[in-house]
């Protein structure tokens, strides 16, 4: 396979991965909210089907927490801020606009990605950002529920989109520090 074909497939693979992350994020939110949290909060209520949940956003559930393991709970939290609850109560349109601006910037970067790890990293951030924007537009906040804790310390609750963003940024840093210099050296050689 020629370099051009392999290189030009990065955006296709990248945007496909971003779409997969969005779908996985929204499916996980539907399953956790409807089949776990709804039963905890409204024991006799029927969970919404996927199509009904997509087309008609249910009202926000109140706080609830279910112990899964001694170090992990499913805890219903609505994050109205950005990562880890920072800027709580910020204007929803400003936060959505900021996330979409970053998504556009990273999408342009993805079309010009020079390495596969860079393309995958950018895709993860794009997919995670869009997944959380969908929540903000539907619910006015992001549904977070994974709650890890130990010895009285709780890591802030998060979701699949947040995982994709954090892992994507970490991989992007690794790519920038270790792999990008090697690619640049190979191009100049």
Image (cartoon, grey):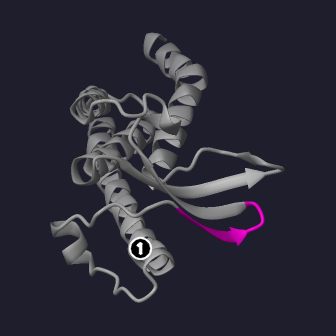
**Vertical side of 138 occupied by 172: above or below:** above
Question: How many numbered callouts?
Answer: 1
Q: Position of residue 4 (x, y in %)?
A: 27, 36
In the displayed structure, 51 sits above or below 189; it is below
Task: Give the residue pinned by disc 1.
Answer: 31
* Vertical arrangement, residue 123 with respect to residue 51, above or below: above
The residue that appears at 34% across and 87% down in the rendered structure is: 46
Queried whether the magenta region covers residue 68, the answer comes back as yes
Residue 103 x %, y %: 28, 33
Q: Is residue 151 left or right of residue 14?
A: right
Q: Residue at x 38, y 55 (%)?
A: 21
Residue at left 59%, top 29%?
174
Q: Where is residue 100 in the image (x, y as percent from the top left)?
A: 24, 33
Residue 50: percent from the left, percent from the top?
27, 76
The magenta segment is 64-71
Badge 1 crowding class, 10 Å Cα cut-off, few under 14, some 14 to 19, many 20 or more, is some
Q: Is residue 102 left or right of residue 66?
A: left
């Amino acid at each position: 396979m020629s370099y051009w074909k392999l290189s030009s497939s990065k955006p296709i693979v990248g945007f496909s991965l971003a779409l997969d992350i969005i779908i996985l994020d929204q499916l996980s939110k539907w399953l956790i909210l409807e089949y776990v949290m709804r039963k905890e909060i409204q024991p006799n209520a029927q969970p919404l089907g996927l199509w009904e949940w997509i087309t008609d956003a249910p009202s926000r559930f109140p706080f609830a927490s279910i112990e899964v393991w001694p170090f992990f709970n499913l805890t219903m939290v609505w994050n109205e801020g950005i990562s880890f609850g920072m800027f709580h109560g910020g204007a929803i349109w400003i936060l959505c606009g900021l996330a979409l601006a970053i998504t556009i910037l990273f999408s342009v970067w993805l079309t010009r990605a020079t390495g596969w790890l860079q393309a995958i990293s950018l895709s993860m951030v794009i997919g995670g950002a869009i997944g959380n924007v969908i929540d903000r537009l539907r619910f006015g906040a992001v549904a977070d529920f994974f709650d890890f804790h130990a010895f009285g310390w709780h890591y802030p609750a998060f979701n699949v989109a947040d995982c994709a963003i954090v892992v994507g940024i970490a991989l992007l840093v690794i790519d920038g520090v270790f792999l990008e210099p090697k690619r640049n050296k190979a191009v100049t050689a």
